[in-house]
Each structure stands twice: as C-alpha cells, then as structure tokens.
Amino acid sequence: MEPNIVEYLKTPPTSAELSNIIKLLGVDIRDIIRTKESEYKEVGADNKSLSDSELLSILVSTPKLIERPIVINRNKAAIGRPPENVLSIL
C-alpha cells in the first residue's frame, strides 16, 4: 500500500473535507481536538457551548488542533494513536 500523506498544516482540510473525515471516524468533533495545545484555549475551542459548526470553523482555521495522524482507507478512517488503531481499517 502506498500512502498519500497530507501535510495538513501546509494544506489544511476544508470544512467539507473535515466534516467527512469526522463522519468516517464515527466520532464527535470534540474527539479529534487536541486539548493540550495552547491554541485550544486561545481560540476559544474550550468553550463547551460552541456548536459543531463553530468548532469545525475553528479546526479549519487552526489545523494544529486536529488530532493526528488520521488514516483513511476507502470509506473508513482511524486516528493513529495508538498506531494499532489503524489496523482495523486496513
């Protein structure tokens, strides 16, 4: 298998792409947010009253907050932490 590596800091996903990735992962948007980054509080992502749409906009504009790596294989996706998570979609 030859991976297609997307450097999301250089080419962040669009709102539609990120929304699709979240659907493929089958998780809540908050499950892919890196809460330990300083930007988490700086951009207000820690605000529990934000809608999914608002959080999506934050992640698109601040891609450093997106959990990584995310591996996508056809119509399945997995967060690669721990790396063994990826085995379920290969």
Image (cartoon, rainbow, N blue to C red):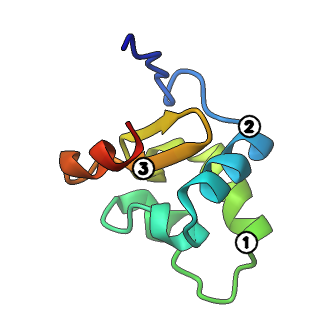
Q: Residue at x 59, y 67 (%)?
A: 29
Dot 3 falls on a residue whose secondary structure is strand
Which residue carries the number 3 mark?
78
The disc at residue 2 is: none
Which residue carries the number 2 mark?
14
Which residue carries the number 1 mark?
52
Q: Quarter holding the C terminus? A: top left
Determine contact: label 1, label 3, CB under 8 Å. no
Determine contact: label 3, label 2, CB under 8 Å. no
Q: Residue at x 72, y 52 (%)?
A: 19
Q: Is residue 31 left or right of residue 38?
A: right
Extreme residue toward the bottom, this view: 49
Dot 1 falls on a residue whose secondary structure is helix
Question: In this view of the protein, which residue sits in the foreground, 60 or 44?
Answer: 60
> Measured from the top left, where is residue 77 in percent x and y?
50, 46
| Residue type at numbered disc 1 | Asp
Is residue 39 shown above or below 70? below
Q: Does the rendering let one see residue 44? A: no
Q: CA distance from mark 1 to mark 2?
A: 15 Å
Question: In this view of the protein, which residue sits in the foreground, 2 or 59?
Answer: 2
Q: Does the rendering let one see residue 86? A: yes
Dot 2 falls on a residue whose secondary structure is loop
> Measured from the top left, where is residue 21 in percent x and y?
62, 47
Q: Is residue 43 left or right of residue 13?
A: left
